[in-house]
Image: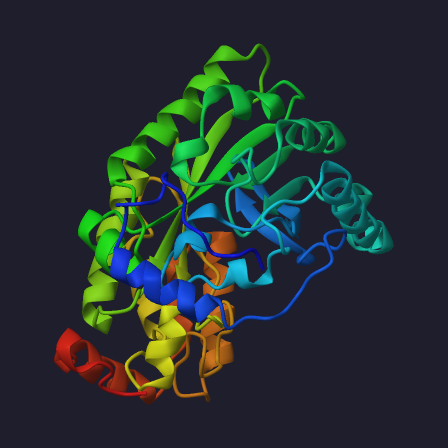
Amino acid sequence: MSQPSPEVYEQGKGMDAHNRAMREIRSRNDASYDPREPTRVWLDEDNTPGGVVDSLTIILNTGGCRWARAGGCTMCGYVAESVEGGSVAHEDLMAQVETCLDYERERADDLDGGQADLVKIYTSGSFLDEREVGAETRRAIAETFGDRERIVVESLPDFVDRETVADFLERGLDADVAVGLETATDRVRHDCVNKYFDFADFEGACAEARAAGEAVDGDAEAGVKGYLLMKPPFLSEAEAVADMKRSVRRCAGVEGCHTVSMNPTNVQRHTMVEELYHDGGYRPPWLWSVCEVLESTADADAIVVSDPVGHGSDRGPHNCGECDDRVQRAVTDFDKRQDPAVFEQVACECERTWDAVMARERSYSLPLAR
């Protein structure tokens, strides 16, 4: 991992004391990674404005998120998987892409047409930050996937502008920018997540994406996927649920944001959340909370989905252990069908415990139940 040395760009943004603590936590990581190997790749299905399609998800191994190297978000440990030195050469990044294409080719028989219509590219940082992924690489990736229908790239709102998004639209690709907004509440984003930008910046990113689509000739369109965080540290279960309900609706009300992905916090290594978890001060969200938010916002003017990573484990969103897989299947079903009736098909005695937690847990005495 690169040496955590904050730049002037990051100073004064976020909690400086937290950033100092996080740099110390991250410095304990001594793992190293091959710059020619992607962090992860997998095939799945995703709900898009064009319907449910096969998807190829790629997590490129880059030099990591610039904000994370300065300290970063309380829950995000992805920078710990980044390449030493802070940058990866164009040739190495394209070698990672080729490895992912090989993975897809080996499984072509499982895909309609032999390849995924949707490609999602994450970098554990900002794909549109040219210090992380250069313009040459961005354009080469746009050309590589120009025969697909849609591409999703991840970025902080700072780096979303019509010129960079246009690189994909000009290839005929519908392009979405996945923005880790985490919450529509600025105070929660600043104090619980330690992200420096405001909801207004998210709105600005949506406007830039729309402008890109309007400026490019052809039928390709650009939009934004808002990524929300269910239960950052320092919120009670009820506070987290209420914040997500408000955030989903506020995101859905922004022109250009067609999808809201609500992601429950999981305990990642080398993070502030992990420190709290080991000290008994944090429990990942209940899967019942995920269901509650999805069911209550099903009428929002956007596709609303969730991906409870690590469900059923102590470090991931979980209930009692007996019903976790059933509830997870209901969430997956909802993602594809957008029908809240799926949640009527799951029940468990532990829902009574969740009800008690929702009613009685307070943020000054977390967690009420493990």
Q: How is the image coloured?
A: rainbow
Residue 144, position as x, y percentages in the image = 75, 32
Along the line of sight, the residue nearer the viewer: 306 or 32 = 32
Residue 287 in sight: no
> In the picture provided, is 95 more to the left or to the right than 183?
right
Residue 218 in sight: yes
Residue drawn 63% across and 56% down? 84
Residue drawn 44% across and 61% down? 76
Report the number of discs: 0
**Quadrant where the image shows the C terminus:** bottom left
Residue drawn 49% across and 67% down? 27
Residue drawn 45% across and 87% down? 321
Along the line of sight, the residue nearer the viewer: 231 or 238 = 231
**Quadrant where the image shows the N terminus:** bottom right
Residue 367, position as x, y percentages in the image = 25, 82
Q: Residue 360 occupies which quadrant of the picture?
A: bottom left
Residue 167, position as x, y percentages in the image = 61, 22
Q: Is residue 147 above or below residue 88?
A: above
Q: Is residue 239 above or below residue 106?
A: below
Q: Is residue 213 above or below residue 26?
A: above
Q: Residue 188 occupies which quadrant of the picture?
A: bottom left
> In the picture provided, is 309 more to the left or to the right than 284?
right
Residue 206, position as x, y percentages in the image = 38, 30
